[in-house]
Amino acid sequence: MTPQPPSDSLHADLCDGTAITDFHTHNLQAPAGCAIINLPQAWTECPAQFHPRPGALYSAGIHPWWTADHEAILRMKQALPRLLSHPQVVALGECGLDRLRGASLAEQEELLRWQLALGETLHLPVTLHVVRAFDILLHLHKELRPTTRWTIHGFRGGPALARQLLAAGLDLSFGVRYNPEAFDLTPPEKRHRETDDGRQTTEATFQDK
Ligand SMILES: [Zn+2]
């Protein structure tokens, strides 16, 4: 199918992330409406299994860790345009580059480019998983000049890398473990909070902030 940009105004309202208190989680039971719940691999391979809860918001993408299985990749590539067109799917991701896991970096980059093009067509913000590949990511951002927000999720880097990413126009999302200096220097409008794999709420995770 040909993906169409979403007409639902929900998308526009949520794309700036203001209503979101948990920017990225794998907890399928996270509170509806204020968390962006990442679709698991099984649902990404087989969208018939995706039964969204009323009011819940989701992100869908091909995780770098899932890229070693070529058959699975084909299924996910086929399913992703349909999943991303669902009105409750408000972000592409997590997708990205991981030098330590998954397919070769060249294969990961090819797949990421394909996903980013799809995200741009659908006007979806992007949630990125990046491990030891920020140079490639910054290059991609410069080359592609996306019109939607790209956010590095689970950011644990130090202040120098944070400054570099922010200067390039990216947002940062912080989980349980993060560098406090990098957190503090990130402007609030570019800073997000997430529970990721954790079961705590962001309120509990960030009670000191
Ligand atoms: Zn995650």
Image: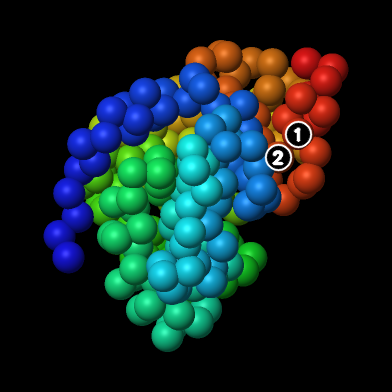
The residue lying at 73 percent from left, 21 percent from top is 181
Residue drawn at (52%, 61%) of the image: 63
Crowd rating for badge 2 (residues with CA inside 10 Å; few <14, some 14–19, many 20+): many
The quadrant in which residue 186 appears is top right
The single residue placed furthest to the front in the displayed view is 54
Residue closer to the observer: 59 or 108: 59
Q: Which mark is residue 20?
A: none
| Position in image of residue 27 (x %, y %) | 67, 50
Examine the rendering and report whether any part of residue 168 can be seen. no
Q: CA distance from mark 2 to mark 1?
A: 6 Å
Residue 185, above or below 67 = above
Q: Is residue 50 above or below residue 12?
A: below
Does residue 93 sit above or below 74 in this rendering? above
User: Residue 95 at x, y = what percent?
Assistant: 47, 55
Disc with the residue nearer the chain's start (2 vs 1): 2
For residue 194, side relative to residue 75 (left or right)? right
Asked if disc 2 and disc 1 are in contact, CB closer than 8 Å, the reply is: yes
Q: Amino acid at mark 2?
A: Thr
Task: Residue 123: tell me if it is visible.
Answer: yes
Q: Which residue is mark 2?
A: 195
Task: Indicate left or right for 164 with 118 as reference.
Answer: right
Give the amino acid at mark 1: Thr
- In the picture, measured across the screen, residue 48 lies left or right of residue 33, that is left
Position in image of residue 65 (x %, y %)? 58, 67
- Label drawn at residue 201: 1
Q: Between tags 2 and 1, which lies in front? A: 1
Quadrant placement of the N terminus = bottom left
Q: Secondary structure at mark 1?
A: loop
- Residue at horizontal 62%, vertical 69%? 101
Name the quarter where the C terminus is drawn.
top right
